[in-house]
Image (spheres, rainbow, N blue to C red):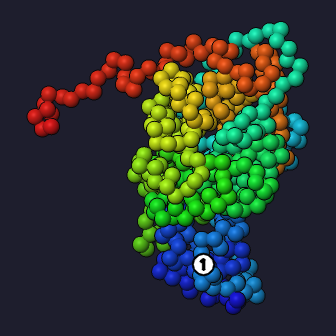
Amino acid sequence: MPKISTAELAKHASPDDAWIVINETIWDVTEFAPKHPGGAEIVHQYLGQDATAAYNEVHGPSLVAKHLPPSKNKGTLDESTITAEWKNSQSSNIESARPPADEKPPLESILNMYDFEDVARRFLSAKSWAFQMTAANDCITKEANIEWWRRIWFRPRVLTGVKSVSTSTTILGQRYAVPIFSAPAALAKLGHPDGELAMARALVAKGTTIIACNNASFSFPEIMQVMPKDHPVFFQLYVNKDHGVTEKLVKEVSSYNPQAIIVTVDLPVVGKREADERVKTDAAYKAPKSFQSQNVKRDKKGAGLARATGSFIDADLQWKDIRWLQTITKAPIFVKGIQSAWDARKALEAGCKGIYISNHGGRAADTAQPSILTLLEIQANCPEVMEEMEVFIDGGIRRGTDILKAICLGASGVCLGRPFLYAVGYGQEGMEHAIEILKDELETVMQMIGITSLDQAHPGLVNTAELDRYVYRSEEHPYAKKIVRRTNRAKL
C-alpha cells in the first residue's frame, strides 16, 4: 500500500472528498459517513485528520475493515511527514477515556454492585460516566427500578434443610450455573480496553453467557472468537431503518446458532438523556468550525453519545416486522422492552419464544412503570404467557435478593446492565468478581428463606402487598375515560 503524507491527507478534508486516519491506515469515508450509525457529523469532524484516539475509545480494531471495502483503503500514513505541530493538532481536543487517577481500590475491597458504581464514578472520564449512568429526563424510572425491588418482602420457611444449594437453571433447554446474564449495553470499551471481550470471558467462566449488544464496541464475530465453540450466546438486535442492513446482520449472527435473537422494541427513538448531553461536547462529538458552514446536518436535540449511537434505529417498527424477522432466521425471537401485560400477550401471539421485560434501564420513557411492576402485571393478567415463553427481566437489579424475587415471581433469568459496565472497569477479573458476589448473595438468601434450588421458588415466598395496588387488571384505565370534546365531535 502507498504511503501518504500528512499534506496529501489534508487535501481530502471535505464531505465530498473525505479521508481519515485510523490506526495508521487511511480510509476514504466519503460514501460511508452519511451511513454512519451515529450520523455523518461524528466522522466529518476528522476529515483530513487522525481519528485513531476517538475510534479506539469505543470500537474494536477490526470494525472499520468490516464496514469499508478494501477499495476504500487508500494506504498508510507516512510517519516521516508527521511533525510535532501536526501531532498536537490531532490530539488537542481528545478527552482521555480513562483520565489519570490514583490506583483503583483493590478488587477484594469491592463487596457489592454499589461499590463498583462508586469506583466507576471516580475513575471513568466525565463523558463515559455520563453515558453509562444517565437515564431519561428526571431519571424517575431509573430510580424506581431500584427502589421498587425493596418494596417486596420475603416470607421465609424454616427447618427445610438447606445445607446444599444450587443456583443453576435451564433456559431454552440450556443449563446455566446461575440465572444471571449481561443486559445488552453499548460501548463497554469505554470502561476497559477489552470491553465486551472481558465480559464474555467472565460470563463463560462463571457458567453463564453474554447477551451481545448490537452497538457493542466489538463485532459479534470478535466476541464469539473469545468464547468456547458451541457455548450458548444471545444477540440483541436493533432493527435498522434499512432493513437490508438488518437482514444481512441477522443472517451473519444466525450462522453462529445463537440461543435467541433479542429484538429491542422500547427505543424507537433515543430519549433525552440530560447528563449525557450536559457533558461539554469535545472533539469526538462536535464538528470543528470549519465544517459548521458546510452541508452537515446537526442534531438540534442534543450532542450526547446516546443520540449519536442510536440514530440508525427504525422508528416505524411494528409487530409485522417481528414476523418478518422470523422468516429470515431459524433462531428463536425474543422481544425486549415489554412494559405491559398486553404487549407480552402480543409477543406470544406473534410466535416469540421469549420476552424481555425492560424499560431500557430508565432510558426510554421516563415515568414508565418499574420493570418489577410489569412482571406483576403479567402474573395478574396473562400468566399463561410465562408458561409458554422464557421471561428475562432487567432494571434496578443490584442484589441477590432482587434476583430471587424475580425468579419467585416467574422470571427465567435476570440481566444486569450498568453494574456489569462498572465491573468491567476491572477487566475480566472484575466481571468474575461481580458475578461471584451476586451468586453468593443469591445462595445465601435461598438458604435464608428455606429453598435449595430455584425450581422451589414460587410467589408464596414473597409479599408483594405494598405493590399490589399499582397492578392494573385491565388494559384500560380503571376509571378515567378518553375524552372527545363536544366542540370537536362535528369535525370527526
- Residue 158, quarter of picture: top right
- State the residue at coordinates (49%, 45%): 265
**Residue 192 visible in the displayed image:** no
Query: Which residue is at the far top?
Result: 159
Element at label 1: loop
Of 91 and 362, the residue lying toward us: 362
Q: How many marks?
A: 1
Horizontal arrangement in the rendering, residue 74 relative to residue 78 (left or right): left
126 vs 63: above or below: above
The N terminus - image quarter: bottom right
Amino acid type, residue under disc 1 in the picture = Pro
Position of residue 437 measured from the top left corner of the image (x, y, whole percent): 81, 33
| Tag 1 residue | 69
Query: Which residue is at the far left?
Result: 490
Horizontal arrangement in the rendering, residue 447 relative to residue 302 (left or right): right
- State the residue at coordinates (76%, 15%): 449
Horizontal arrangement in the rendering, residue 56 relative to residue 158 (left or right): left
- State the residue at coordinates (69%, 40%): 173
Circle 1 residues within 10 Å: few <14, some 14–19, many ≥20:
few
Position of residue 307 measured from the top left corner of the image (x, y, whole percent): 52, 53
Position of residue 110 measured from the top left corner of the image (x, y, whole percent): 83, 36
- Residue 486, quarter of picture: top left
294 vs 155: above or below: below
- Residue 314, quarter of picture: bottom left
